[in-house]
Amino acid sequence: MTIVFKPTETFHDDFTYRNSDAAILRFPFPFGEDAYMYSVNIEPHVPVGPSPVYLHAFDVDEHYVAECRERARVLALDPGRCKVLPHMMTAQWDTLELIMESFARDYPEHFSLSKNGSTWTWQNRLLGIEDKFTFGDAATLPYPPFEYITRQAQGDFTLQDQRNDNLFVDGGMVTTQADWSLEFDVGMSFHEWHGPVPLAHQIGVFDRALKFLLRLQQAQPVRRLNWTMTINPRLDTSPENYPVWGPDRLTVTPENVAQKVHLRVELQTLFRLPRSNAILFGIRCYLASVDELARVEKWRKRLHRVLRDLPPELETYKGLTRFRQMVIDYLAPFDDGAPLAKGCQPDQTSL
Amino acid sequence: MSGTATLTLRVREAEMIAPLLKRFVLESADRAPLPSIGAGAHLRLLLKEGQKKFRNAYSIAATAPDNSAYEIIVRRVAHSRGGSAFLHDHVDAGAIVEADFPGNLFPISHVARKHLLISGGIGITPFLGYLAYLKTTPAPFELHHFCRVEETETFERALRGYDAGKIHLHPELAQFDLIDMLRKQPLGTHLYVCGPEGLMNMVLAAARSHGWPGSKLHSESFGGAHAGGAPFVAILERSGLEIHVPEDQTLLEAIEAAGLEPPCLCRGGACGQCQTDVIEGEPEHRDHYLNAAEHAENRSMIICVSRAKGDRIVLDL
């Protein structure tokens, strides 16, 4: 399907970001049941699923150009959002190869990669980039390889080194995060960086997830969804910028709640990288306003039930305290309480 | 869908490099580039000799610069189950073999200040892959290889081209002071050992007893929980099906092949989605979802990775 890109939409100030009808229907709605609780909801990242966002290794959608511009803007203000420890250079090249090969294979009309020995030529027609470089020689690219390629991809990425039966977050490109900081987390082990998450530690989710990930195999990537909520379609909700976005929460009123409050879904993917044996963690962020989601009958009812019955610890952790009730009140009249079909898919093909 | 990617390979070259060692160069049957790999990666070949099937893992000793080929070296094992003898006797240039996508259970450390490699016999093969990588990094290294006298020349040839000052060949029975060598290593050195079990145990025990932390010790071991196991029969009581689970298939895959779709998610023994009640028989638990008490009770099992201990198990499915 041809993607109609929206190169001028913004994720700050005037917030012109919107989803087309097609983008709403392909939204990776994360709730397959009426109640939400943590689980090791990891599944193989295979090209099937309840939304087209699963069809490719890395999803490219109508927001691609605008998101790459937003990334460049954030990096210009704060270059520390991209950081890779020196021992991860092989993993940098692994990442570049994986993303370039995936893009060129999955979106040949937009990207191409040709290899002549170690001389590679990369074309990104959407951003007007064409570069010839020597694979393995960082001096032949305008940025270090990991930064170079993740400036051209939607979503955040971190690099995990595997050692001592643990994973260490030893690099990342993080400009679209839900209130966590790469600069703070860099170098941390798996349980350290998951430290702030409530409830999940007690039920052993992280112990099991770590054991599973340590055995992750090349060519068998896995994925999971995570979610939170954000006021305004703002991608950059970093702790570094809290003074910029924190006050947004005070602007939500019963009148504007459906336009202001966005469900923020992360499609998280994990790839074992071949040369370095590191793990690439993709955190692709999708935003849709309550208004947009409410156009899908199943989703407006289910979102109401999930938020209504959410454990209080999760309300606090996900930062929903100030506006959760307003969203529930907005959605309640749409929910007749009738049973809903299981699964995340929208169960309708048009809006 | 098993989620396991496979490769179809053609033998480009096959040659004896010592009376018991045969070297193979494998390329993709469709000439496409092979997957990129890292130091320490292995290839699991799926060999078929009549009704017999073998799945043997071999370290990848070298990769062509353009990823067009992998090289492995196979030692003919005296009392092999047949895999190595089959490769020696029946597999030559032009042959087609199937393989799993490469894996890596012996990766090199990227934070080591120095790499100390100790190998015995055919255990040199992962280190041949290491050496290619070590050429590109500034961290110093030292390789000690123990081998049969009659194979010394073969290994000398294989190691030509690397800094001779860092490569030490020890033909069997030669004098060598392991403890002294371990004591001389600077802090931050990582030790890697690959070879016969006796050598590995001796080296690792010596290192531990001289204060080396476990995080700096690495040894190669193939297999693991996903490597299949003995065939068995699963009776699915509710469905009335009798399912034969062969050695190279998981219980979940066999059930899916019979047309059932039990709930599952991670397919790696972590999430618990496919937990199934056991009515009769004893599971061989390989998951890390159930706790030790639940494993001991044998009342349920995680069917994506666990198997039956005996030849028959009855499940509530």
Image (cartoon, coloured by chain):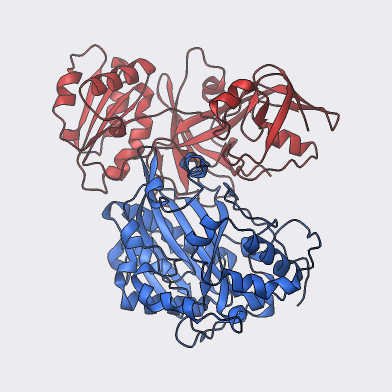
Chain colours: A blue, B red
Q: Nearer the viewer, residue B289 or A313?
A: A313
Q: Position of residue B208 (x, y in %)?
A: 26, 23
What residue appears at the point 27 percent right and 66 percent down from the top-left corner? A139
Q: Quadrant of residue A13?
A: bottom left
Q: Nearer the viewer, residue B42 or A95?
A: A95
Q: Nearer the viewer, residue A301 or B33?
A: A301
Side of B158 relative to A277 (left or right): left
What residue appears at the point 62 percent right and 29 percent down from the top-left corner? B306
Residue B133 seen in render: yes
Above or below, comparing residue A165 to residue B196 in the picture: below
Q: Quadrant of residue B295?
A: top right
On the rendered image, what quadrant is the N terminus of chain B found in?
top right
Q: Position of residue B199 (x, y in %)?
A: 32, 18
Above or below, comparing residue B293 to residue A154 in the picture: above
On the rendered image, what quadrant is the C terminus of chain B found in?
top right
Above or below, comparing residue B54 to residue A328 in the picture: above
Residue A268 seen in render: no
Above or below, comparing residue B251 to residue A231 in the picture: above
Q: Position of residue B242 (x, y in %)?
A: 81, 26
Q: Quadrant of residue A143?
A: bottom left
Q: Position of residue A227 (x, y in %)?
A: 55, 62
